[in-house]
Amino acid sequence: MKKRLLLIFIALFVYAVPASAQYLSSNQSSNAVEVVLKNIISENGITEVLILVDNEINSSALQGMGIKVQTKAGKVWTALVPVNKMEELLKVKGVLMVESPSKFHSTRMKMDSARISMQTNKIEQAQNLPLAYSGKGVVIGIVDIGFDTRHPAFYAKDSSNTRISRIWQQNFNDGPAPEGYNYGTERKGEEVFKDLDLHGSHGTHVASIAAGSGIGSPDLKYKGVASDAELVFVSIKYYDSTLPGSALSDYLIANAAIIDAYAYIFNYAKSVGKPAVINLSWGMHTGPHDGTSLFDLATNALVKEGNILVGAAGNEGTNNMHFESLIQNDTVSTLCIENQRNNYPSEEVYVDIWGSGNSEFSLSVSIVDTFGNIIYQSPYTSSRIADNKEFIFSVQGGEVKINKHLTPLYLPNNKPNVLLWVQNPNPKLYAIQLNLTSSFSQIHAWNSGGIYRYTSGSFRNKIGNLDLSNTLKSGNSRYTVGENGGTSKSVITVGSYTAKNFYVGIFGDTFNDRNYSSIGQITPFSSRGPTADGRIKPDILAPGMDVAAAIYLQQYPGWAWNRLVSFEPFKNDSFAYGVFSGTSMASPQVAGVVALMLQANPALTPAQIIHILKQTAIIDAATGNVPNTNAGNGKINAYEAVKEALRVVSSRGLQVKHEVLVYPNPAQTWINIESEREIMQIELLDIQGREIRRFDTKPSHKQSLNVMGLAKGLYLLKVDQSIYRILLD
């Protein structure tokens, strides 16, 4: 898994990326299991994993092995496992698959004008609204790294007390862990200011966008969207201190730790009787990108009424890091490039390749010179057998190293997968060529770039003077919404558009990104969809270019000080606001808007929230006809979304086993009903429950009811066994 804290400095402080995992199942060869175990990332002999289980899982057997289950998200569990028990775990009845953090998979991290663009200013002014919604009564959770908990942005508007109720520092073990968990330290009260999170400024900036108070900026100019929301932070367990700083160390992260963070925040919100929305501005490109990763399956189990997840789409919109080809009795080749190859003496690529369900493909790696001559070609390796293959070949300048990790059947989607590492010791003389062959398979591959450093990758058919466009296929930037923030069926995925592209810093420096992206345009870096299973992503766009918010001054890089826009004292210390760009900045805008919607209507379901965001989105020349895979459903309209949230009626107090949308409410002539299951029967009742009209409908997921001629007033709408209040106006 590659997760990254990317700096696209025009300046783009982009979305982060958590570490990926090694896939283990009981049907793998002993050699493959041995290789995985050798490369597992652990701390004191303990690793955190995701486990796919079935109904026959023997929980007591896990406990007897010293395995501590942390979170149960449907059939995906997180657990702390002694590495020496991993093989034994695979043999437990009911354990279908284990995903562990491994050196094979590294990860990294990848508002003034924004408020006007999203029309949150109208909410602040309570235009045609009962009150000025500000997120009060809602928990906003931020799962990230680099939190400055002392920043005034996280204080109440009167500067008296912090709004941070909890912070779970998963990397610190100097205090009690949260109840139900066996690692990290939970801090509350004055303890939230202890053990500063010295890992950058990403979390501070993201949290401030979603819910910053604006204190410390001129006239609160840079306050966030939901400035009265209660805050819960989780500083993610993401590093491995046994490795030097690289993509295999500082930004390694277990997906299980993020799932634990989600459950922790949702459980806290439930304990105080509040709805919660969580933002994750992280992503990666190790995984199937089709919603079937164990991480995505876990999110499906966690999201429900009162539990909402929002994620960043990614920042690969201008990078041809995706490759696709329908291969039928043919061989297709492409060049795998580390985009920053000219900056290093050697080149690295990290490529994740997936075939279509129940198919098979084979791959070979060629090393070609500047004339296109093949200097070395590895044997073709089939995805049919779970194994690990390594090839080493000497060339001028050192050794070519090729490592292929093969998974013939990823259980959740029945797809074959090969994770490929290649190291080219001399990029001035050689390039890496990937060759794929199959009788029939739809191939999708993602090139994340460096293995041991923070770079990016792409697929090309020419480089420098080497032009192989007649025989090789190039990549594209489609399907680049990332895993974690972008591909889940339950996460609201956010892309970026430009609401600001010019600033004057506190030192009088001006920086101008107008040539990069015009006001109103989809930001070039914003990742494009669809998902690998064909779903429209991103779901919505929000401002992500040159967004001003709180920064962690102690962790802010000196070379970026020209992007500071405010610098003020607070409680005998100095704090600042600065400008970053990326879908990391767009995603918390939407999380803040969702908090406003939940304040207006705490009973909104996830399906209702996404429906409202889509229904009220701004459509213009930049978005084009929506939905589409660049703009999703359009640009977020906070004002109209909150207004619609007030009109939607939710079912409460009754057992509802499926999502039902009833809109508009109030209604005048027609009522629309949408359901995940077929609607069998619809009745309109008066407020005392007496039948007014029974609608003659055929079973369908969507119904439109004509209510013209009925007296104005409050009614009850009975949809099968669920009852909704509806106002005819």
Image (cartoon, grey):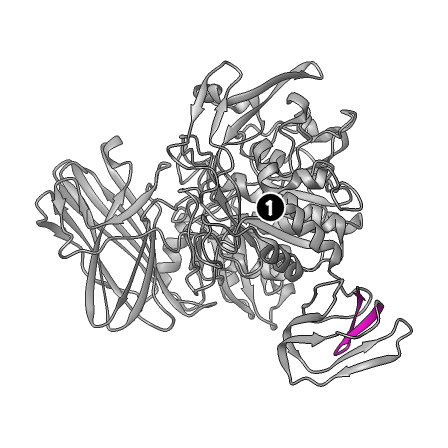
Q: Is residue 264 visible?
A: no
For the residue pair 518 and 142, the one nearer the viewer reads as: 518
| Residue 188 shown left or right of residue 149 in the figure | right
Q: What is the chief secondary structure element of the magenta stretch?
A: strand
Residue 282 in view: yes
| Location of mark 1 (residue) | 590
In terms of depth relative to the viewer, which is nearer, 526 or 351?
Answer: 526
Report the side of 678 relative to 38 (left or right): right
Q: Position of residue 216 (x, y in %)?
A: 66, 21
Measured from the top left, where is residue 177 in percent x and y?
68, 41
Asked where in the image residue 534 lies, by quadrant, the reply is bottom left
| Residue that protrudes farthest toward the right in the picture | 688
Estimate the x, y position of residue 366 in percent, counting from the top left: 17, 52
Q: Is residue 448 magenta?
A: no
Q: Is 721 inside the magenta-drawn segment?
A: yes
Front-lying residue, 408 or 528: 528
The secondary structure type at the circle numbered 1 is: helix
- Residue 194 lies, with reference to residue 68, above or below; the image says above
The region drawn magenta spans 714-728
Split into 4 quadrants, where in the image is the C terminus?
bottom right
Q: Label 1 is placed on what type of residue? A: Val
Q: Position of residue 531 (x, y in %)?
A: 44, 59
* Horizontal side, residue 119 vs residue 413: left or right: right
Up the image or down, 700 lies above or below 400; here it is below
Q: Residues within 10 Å of mark 1 (few under 14, many from 20)?
A: many
Q: Nearer the viewer, residue 119 or 154?
A: 119
- Left or right, 591 with respect to 14, comes to right
Q: Residue at x 13, y 38 (%)?
A: 429
